[in-house]
Amino acid sequence: MKVVYRRIRFLAFTFFIASLICGCASGRINQFKNFAEAGIAYSDSIATLTKSSGETAVDADSLILIQRRKNLSPEERGNTIIDRNKLLKARFAVLGVLRRHAQLLRSYFVSLAALAGSSAPSDIGTSTEQMASALETLGSDIRKKQKIDSEENAQAAGGAAKIIVAHFQNEALEKELRKRSKTIEREIELQQEVLESLAAQIKADLQIALNRQETDEVVDPFRDPKDELPKDWASRRREILLSNLSLSAIDAASDAAKSLKTAFVVLIENRFTQTDYQSLVKDVNEIIVLIEKIQNKDKK
């Protein structure tokens, strides 16, 4: 996963450099390609993160159930496992919709880059319209599941109304941006809002798992009357304690969504710079690091 991302980052950087040295029209095309590459990396990382966070949620909930089970009657055990499974399934439904939402954004960014470089864009324009419509439908579903007030969310995204779409030589591209830039910005902002909530859940789930690991692999072996500790005790103690410090990195997903929104706005206002691209790449790369930490935790 990490190797794939680095390759995408290198290709995108190549596109960006090309945009600086090419003429205005071709430079703008390369900027859209550059943004699309970053958007693809973001969407793919969110797809992996939602899957990994779902697995972590199950593991954390199982640890809670194991601890509580001995204090419950058989009937209470049956009711508890059914209720907990129902809650997790509801959470997985939200994660699944968010994953599809991110993949639609991915497809839209790819089509937008194609539209920027197309001389016969009619089919592409139809495609972007369909994807934008699907995004709004999924976005509405997410808002209902997350109890997000659509009107309040739209007001919070008031900056979308202030977007000044730059003039482009490609009339179809300019028309597309004027027609749907507010919609796309609002859907990116929805990603950010849901990911902020998801970050809090992932932190709680990982903390449960880390607490269990600390007890089983650090505290209990040290307290054991045996004279010898496990050979890897010191290294595991370091890993587990440092993992607790790394929980702050979980905010990376919502940070990446924020950077994606900023990059989208400045791109269509013709203010996209290398700094905007690098900021987005940095935040997306942090998601990759987070995913690796979650997956490494699962291997222990």
Image (tube, grey):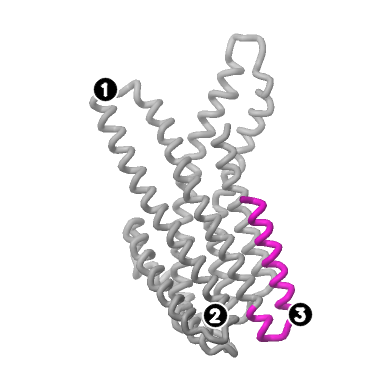
Q: State the separation of the CA atoms marked 1 and 2.
A: 63 Å
Kind of residue at disc 1: Ser
The residue sitting at 61% across, 38% down in the picture is: 243
> What secondary structure is marked by label 3?
helix
The residue sitting at 65% across, 23% down in the picture is: 233
Q: Residues within 10 Å of mark 2 (few under 14, many from 20)?
A: many
Which label number is shown at residue 21? 3
Sequence-wise, the earlier of marks 3 and 1 is 3
> What secondary structure is marked by label 2?
helix
Q: Residues within 10 Å of mark 3 (few under 14, many from 20)?
A: few
Q: Is residue 118 left or right of residue 20?
A: left
Q: In the rendered structure, which segment of residues is drawn in magenta?
A: 1-29
> Foreground mark, 3 or 1?
3
Image position of 237 with respect to 161: above or below:
above
Q: Is residue 79 left or right of residue 112?
A: left
Image position of 223 with respect to 112: above or below:
above
Most common SS among magenta residues = helix
**Residue 8 lies in what quarter of the image?**
bottom right
**Residue 295 lies in what quarter of the image?**
top right
> What secondary structure is marked by label 1?
loop
Kind of residue at disc 3: Ile
Q: State the separation of the CA atoms marked 3 and 2.
A: 21 Å
Instruction: Tell me the residue that label 2 is attached to.
Output: 115
The residue sitting at 36% across, 56% down in the picture is: 146
- Residue 95's x, y, as percent? 42, 52
- Residue 254's x, y, as percent? 52, 57
Instruction: Tell me the residue that label 1 is attached to.
Output: 73
